[in-house]
Amino acid sequence: MMPRFDHQAAEARWQALWDERQSFAADDNSDKPKAYVLEMFPYPSGRIHVGHVRNYTMGDVVARTRRAQGFEVLHPMGWDAFGMPAENAAMEKGVHPGGWTRANIVAMRTQLKRLGFALDWSRELATCEPDYYGQEQALFLDLLAAGLVYRKESAVNWDPVDMTVLANEQVIDGRGWRSGALVERRKLSQWFLKITDFAEDLLDGLKGLDHWPEKVRLMQENWIGKSTGLKFTFRLSPSPLAGEGDSPQASGVRGGFDVFTTRPDTLFGASFAAIAADHPLARQCAEGNPALAEFVAQCQAGGTAAADIETQEKLGFDTGLSVVHPLDPNIRLAVFVANFVLMDYGTGALFGCPAHDQRDLEFARKYQLPVLRVVAAECEEDAPIGDEAYTGPGRMVHSRWLDGMTAEDARAAVIARAQAEGWGEAVTQYRLRDWGVSRQRYWGTPIPIIHCEICGVVPVPKKHLPVILPEDVTFDIPGNPLDRHPTWKHVDCPQCGKPARRETDTLDTFTNSSWYFIRFASAPDDRPFDPAVAAKWLPVGQYIGGVEHAILHLLYSRFWTRALQRIGMLDVAEPFAGLFTQGMVTHETYSRPQGEGLPPLWFAPDEIERSGSGATLKTDGAAVEVGRVIKMSKSKKNVVNPDATVARYGADAVRWFVLSDSPPERDLVWSEAGIDGAWRFVQRVWRLAEDNAAASEGVPEPKLDRAVHRTIAAVTSDIDRLQFNKAIARLYELVATLERSAAGPSRRAGVISCLQLVAPMAPHLAEEAWALLGQTGLICDAAWPVADPALLVDDEVTIAVQVNGKLKGDFTAAKGSDKAALEAAALALPGVLRTLDGAAPKKIIVVPDRLVNIVA
Ligand code: ANZ
Ligand code: ZN
């Protein structure tokens, strides 16, 4: 039997050696150029999944390559260790969130180490440990002192059965995800970070991020949601509800309210005004109107998720009030309280133009309000509006002095008039809201605040940090265990010394991930980071992770660095210079129907025997349905445990496979056959190394040298552009070429270069083969091969040969060959000899390096 590459022995040997030599420890004081390569750190859910493997392998290839290219590389790993799943596990399994999380970290660290990633484990951190979250508390206090943190009443989703606040994602169809109880809206005093202070800067900064995917920049832009428009005041006209002779002012209602519109051009198409249920005017009207009060209460019930508001039925309640149209005092518009108007956007009030806004149109149809088109596209002119509002460009109609203008010009004209007449002003609005960071949860960073009856809100003095999260808590009753802890929250006020109460809310876990990349770069004991050291590494050169974090995590991190910059702690605005979002890992699904009305029964890939296009269940041998290839998910059971695969095929084969099959930004279909193919390739490279283990005599082979150097250049640039699958395709080619070549110094040199190019992807194989070839040191320490430019230029050309303009064949010649040589070679071609059949050519035309045409 062919001697094989023994992956188990090799992996253990090299991993131990890298560890012992601290090969991948980053030196803050190195004078080499720095490269910070980072993958989004995992949540310690229990096991590494293949999505992690793909993500971390990509980062590892970049890190190892940069290292070989002479950079001092920082490639750290840690744990995003606070969050809900730990609390859920605590409630379901009766384990402590801390114990559960830390056990998971141990298991997952072992799994990651088996994959041979070039990580600086000395910088490992877990956000659930006081040395991390204590420094985060210090940062929170700094931001508070700088006025970037404030407290305000804000609505939350309240589950009345579980007695807990729910995140929007935990509200499903208006009900709590665990209890199934109807969710209520409650007002709580909560902490906010002033991200809106940076809205314009966060938007502006996107322009410079040219190593980010365009789609992510667009998602961020939409999330920030800058709108420019007009804010103007609607004057209330005396209302019949206010009673005989009473003006609205007299009945206590103010003289009017402000609205915000992005479409002032459509003002002549206005058919109603609407205010939010939480609007002060709505509350005032509700006081004397039980039916309206009932409607307002209805709107306030239910969750706070904006997505629900978009899709729910548009409902309104006529207040009986009306307002005066700002462009024509003879026009009155009825004022509704409407469920689709949000209190925390714009002014909490709008005018409705049903012809040109879909929500307004649905509303108008329901309450039989007029629908008047005021913008007409070129070809449809004055067509009536059906059940779709027209939101495109066009010219103004039915709009008096605006008629004939483009909608865009009309927008400017109305704003100019409003400003001139003093009833409105141009304003900019952002969809971005301040970041509410209070969570009524146990497993998170305690907010370092004390509430005192006398002094009010008192920050915990820094010398008392960290505020340690107590671990002696239970989860047998619903609610936040910090609230019912017997002693933890009772403290003396740091200012007056009287008994006071700790804040029992914890910070949103997104705060943990908003600065972990800084702590990786510098982690002193007595401060969050050392700015000089952090600035050496930051920004992260290449950040890699899932597109599911394209909005919040990245935006919060971009905010956090800006906030630190503003308070003079760190001079880095953009945390991530380069960003790459990798595709998902997918797999077939296997199921059996369970009968009418029941969901199918799903089976895991390792329960299945696959044969041809069908599949059977191992336990009973009967058929199962092979379903679509979809993202791996626990619910469909199409999850693969990487441990078994790594044990069987080796880390290198798994790493090779996750890079090889599809472009990194696309989804990857996990297949056993694919990994088997990768394993075979590993064996081929090993054989090639064995065949070239000894130094070899002979003459150089320029053609092979050129092929090798072309591959060096191409693979280097592929890795630079993160096109790992292309790099791998070229290495397949190079290995095939080397296998076909005759033994000699060129082949041995080629094998050595080939191993270096393979090393970032399959590092254990590469180290083992490097040693076998008697190379000095470790391959991970060897300098990256550099392509010789002289070997990259093509010095051979293909010459086409024609007889009377018809192609008869071609041959290769050295570049720049003289005419006589090309003529002679052309005349000797079999196709030419046959066509001429002994006749002498009349004329021969030679185009150097390209063509010989023979006229017969
Ligand atoms: C009249 C109008 C006519 C509008 C028209 C749109 C189209 P963006 O672009 O996302 O910023 N609006 C204003 N305040 C609102 C609130 N608190 N809750 C819900 N909707 C509100 O959205 C701005 C538009 O959303 C505004 O422009 C307003 O409707 C509505 F043909 O005013 B528009
Ligand atoms: Zn006090």
Image (cartoon, rainbow, N blue to C red):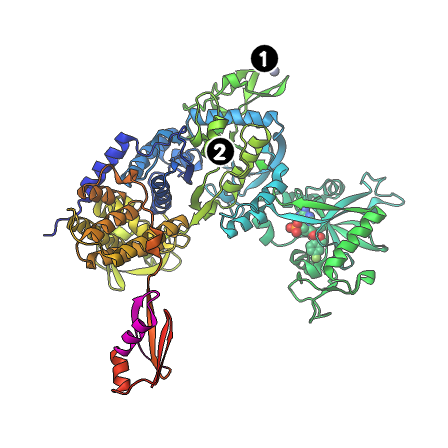
> In this orientation, which residue lies closer to the viewer: 647 or 300?
647
Element type at marker 1? Answer: loop
- Estimate the x, y position of residue 712 in percent, counting from the top left: 32, 51
Q: Is residue 606 above or below residue 435?
A: below
Amino acid on which disc 1 is placed: Lys
Specify whether tag 1 is near ligand 2 (CB below 8 Å).
yes
* Residue for badge 2: 515
Question: Quarter of the image containing the C terminus?
Answer: bottom left
> In this orientation, which residue lies closer to the viewer: 261 or 256?
261
Counting every numbered tag in the picture gives 2
Indicate yes or no whether the magenta region holds residue 815: yes
- Estimate the x, y position of residue 17 in percent, counting from the top left: 24, 33
Task: Find residue 498 and name its label.
Answer: 1
Residue furthest out toward the left? 1
Residue drawn at x 18%, y 47% as measured from the top left:
5
> In this orientation, which residue lies closer to the viewer: 658 or 604?
658
Q: Quadrant of ligand 2?
A: top right
Residue furthest out toward the top? 497
What residue range appears in magenta?
806-828
Residue drawn at x 54%, y 32% as measured from the top left:
571
Q: Is residue 185 above or below residue 722?
A: above
Amino acid on which disc 2 is placed: Trp
Residue drawn at x 64%, y 54% as measured from the top left:
314
Task: Find residue 235 and name its label.
Answer: none
Element type at marker 2? Answer: loop
In the image, 99: left or right of 307? Answer: left
